Amino acid sequence: MSVTTDREAMVKAAVEGQRAALASGGQDGLLAAEKNKRQREELARRIAIIADQIRDVDTDPSDISRSINAEIGVITAATVAGVYDNKEGASLVKSLREMGRQLSDTEVLSKKDILNWDGPKFRHAIERFVELFQKAMRESGVGEDQKRMIMKHFSDILAQQEPIVRKEVQRM
């Protein structure tokens, strides 16, 4: 069964349950209340699934956003059908919208290009580039004395230019 069909069935069941509760009191009212309770539990389960998807770095944010929007639609329909009162429905929709905003904020931060000059990853990358540069000198026939002189000169230039490069990167 598709997700859309599941949600449509849930909304239809909510509407029917509410009508039954209004049409007759007594046993039917208790059945409708039990049905509403199950629907609330199902909503809580689906929201927990969305929260798990947000925590999962491998889940596509657009899929999560679609799930959030679908749940907002289900809640709106259920509110109109009387499963939730207006205040409760609005509160649920507000909570889901906040989850969507948090998802967007998280996605923006995860794509932000942060360079940690003093971090181990950056230091490792620089060390590897220096090793590759030394390998290129060795393979091109540069003598050991000349190689030491080039590396010393490179080290001096790097020490002198590092603050300038840091400022340039910060401005990017």
Image (cartoon, rainbow, N blue to C red):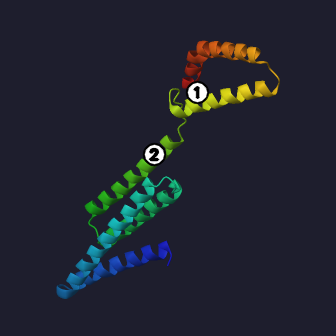
Quadrant of residue 137 within the rendered picture: top right
Quadrant of residue 23 within the rendered picture: bottom left
Residue matched to label 2: 106
Residue matched to label 1: 172
| Mark 1 vs mark 2, CA separation in Å | 21 Å
State the quadrant of the C terminus.
top right
Q: In the picture provided, is 39 more to the left or to the right than 64?
A: left
Determine the residue positioned at 38% across, 66% down: 46
Q: Amino acid at mark 1?
A: Met
Quadrant of residue 169 within the rendered picture: top right
Give the x, y percent position of residue 152. 66, 14
Determine the residue positioned at 18% across, 84% down: 25
Determine the residue positioned at 27% across, 84% down: 20
Q: Residues within 10 Å of mark 1 (few under 14, many from 20)?
A: few
The secondary structure type at the circle numbered 2 is helix
Query: Would residue 3 be visible to someone looking at this image?
Result: yes
- Position of residue 148 relative to residue 119, above or below, is above
